[in-house]
Image: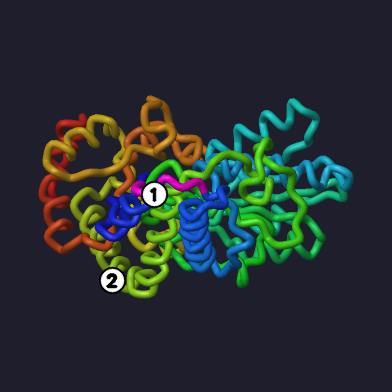
């Protein structure tokens, strides 16, 4: 998922951290100051998801956190079985990791989703076997905005004594995420999706859960993820996490009505357009909409020329001229999938912004090969 612009506070925190040359592993004064800054950030990231600081381990990205969760948790439980379950709409860092694990002898079940992109808890439960050691289901889908029923899923998985990981990269900072209410064993985060800098992420690992280290060769992150820490990125992530936690209660209340107004406006203006994903169980400010027959790449560029920035599929597949694996998994035909764009409303979105989108959209669609008749 695309990130957000850095706030002045996050920029300032990063700049201050960059002025420090201390290595957090060093014992001298500069090193101790760096370590203190790192631990303050760890506590802030933990607070965003209701965890303890000691359960947060910094990584280079959400992709790394996902890969570590799958390989590390599965390896730690290998004596109990060799079966993993994921969903077909997971991020490619999940899907490609389990495909590699299959080649290494793991058995993998990839669950289908319904037309809204949701995993059915009953179907997941029926896929569990005595050999299942790990289930990984995303908290929310970054392409279509659908929230998964993670609370119900984790209840069924934990009742069988099976490890559960969730990719919450798209969800944290946008909707409430709590490892107290949803007792996952591991949870992935990425700073850039909630206002932090790119190139830094984190993996929550519940205390007592066994996981193999991801990188070895150093004592950083309790020896589980070796390598000198990206201190400025970590500090920026902590600052962004605290700001997101503070703003989250009012964010949905303010942005959801704007989202609903824009969706109604688009569908009234262009009757053949389709809203993708679950109509209610979705991100407050997220819209995935398809215009059958349109060229989504041309549409994104046409809107960009009008000063409207929208997304084309997920960030990791934006250059691929093919239907997204998520949209295909939801049963969408190519003519609709290839005419899909993603819009994100943020804290600074105004009524005037919505009016501008609705004003320029018909012309942009005409450029993209789809003639629109106003209704």
Q: Is residue 32 left or right of residue 86?
A: left
Q: Nearer the viewer, residue 96 or 29?
A: 29
As helix, strand or loop, the secondary structure at mark 1 comes to: loop
Residue located beneath label 1 in the image: 20
Residue 83 x/y as whole percent: 79, 42
Query: Residue 241 is drawn in which quadrant?
Result: bottom left
Using the image, determine if residue 79 lies above or below residue 352. above
Extent of the magenta region: 18-23
> For the residues carrying marks 2 and 1, which lies nearer the camera in this image?
1
Q: Is residue 308 at all visible to an observer of this figure? A: yes
Q: Residue furthest front?
A: 28
How far apart marks 2 and 1 lie (CA) works out to 38 Å
Which disc number belongs to residue 256? none
Residue in view at x 12 percent, y 52 percent: 356
What residue do we see at 82% from left, 47% from top? 77
At x 17%, y 62%, the residue is 350
Q: Residue at x 70, y 40 (%)?
A: 71
Residue 301 place in picture, x, y as percent: 20, 33
Counting residues from the N terminus, which is met first, the one under dot 2 or under dot 1?
1
**Secondary structure beneath label 2:** helix
User: Which of these two is toward me, 252 or 341?
Assistant: 252
Binning the other alpha carbons within 10 Å of mark 1 as few (below 14), some (14 to 19) or many (20 upward) gives some
Q: Position of residue 361 (x, y in %)?
A: 16, 45
Q: Quadrant of the N terminus?
A: top left
How crowded pointer 2 is (Cα within 10 Å; few <14, some 14-19, many 20+) is rated as some
Label 2 sits on residue: 254
Colouring chosen for the image of the structure: rainbow
| Residue 240 included in the magenta stretch of the image | no
Image position, residue 295 (x, y; %): 28, 30
Prevailing SS of the magenta stretch: loop
């Amino acid at each position: 998922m695309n990130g957000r612009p850095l706030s002045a506070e996050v920029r300032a925190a990063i700049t201050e951290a960059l002025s420090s040359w201390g290595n957090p592993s060093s014992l001298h004064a500069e090193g101790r100051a760096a370590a203190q800054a790192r631990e303050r950030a760890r506590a802030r990231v933990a607070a965003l998801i209701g965890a303890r600081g000691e359960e947060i381990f910094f990584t280079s990205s959400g992709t790394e956190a996902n890969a570590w969760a799958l390989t590390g948790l599965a390896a730690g439980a290998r004596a109990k079985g060799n079966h993993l379950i994921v969903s077909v709409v997971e991020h490619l860092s999940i899907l490609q990791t389990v495909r590699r694990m299959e080649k290494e002898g793991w058995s993998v079940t990839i669950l289908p989703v319904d037309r809204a992109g949701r995993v059915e808890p009953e179907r997941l439960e029926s896929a569990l076997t005595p050999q299942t050691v790990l289930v990984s289901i995303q908290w929310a889908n970054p392409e279509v905005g659908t929230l998964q029923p993670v609370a119900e899923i984790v209840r069924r998985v934990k009742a069988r004594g099976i490890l559960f990981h969730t990719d919450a990269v798209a969800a944290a900072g946008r909707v409430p995420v709590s490892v107290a209410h949803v007792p996952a064993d591991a949870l992935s985060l990425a700073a850039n999706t909630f206002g932090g800098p790119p190139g830094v992420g984190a993996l929550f690992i519940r205390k007592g859960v066994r996981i193999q280290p991801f990188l070895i060769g150093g004592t950083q992150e309790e020896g589980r993820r070796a390598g000198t820490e990206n201190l400025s990125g970590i500090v920026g992530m902590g600052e962004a996490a605290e700001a997101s936690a503070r703003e989250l209660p009012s964010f949905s209340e303010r942005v959801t009505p704007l989202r609903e107004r824009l969706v109604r406006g688009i569908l009234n203006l262009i009757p053949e357009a389709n809203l993708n994903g679950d109509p209610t169980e979705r991100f407050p400010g997220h819209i995935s909409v398809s215009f059958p027959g349109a060229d989504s790449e041309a549409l994104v560029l046409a809107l960009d020329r009008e000063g409207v920035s929208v997304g084309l599929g997920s960030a990791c597949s934006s250059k691929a001229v093919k239907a997204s694996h998520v949209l295909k998994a939801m049963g969408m035909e190519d003519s609709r999938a290839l005419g899909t764009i993603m819009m994100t409303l943020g804290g600074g979105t105004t009524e005037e912004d919505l009016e501008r989108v609705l004003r320029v959209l018909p012309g942009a669609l005409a450029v993209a090969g789809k003639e629109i008749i106003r209704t």
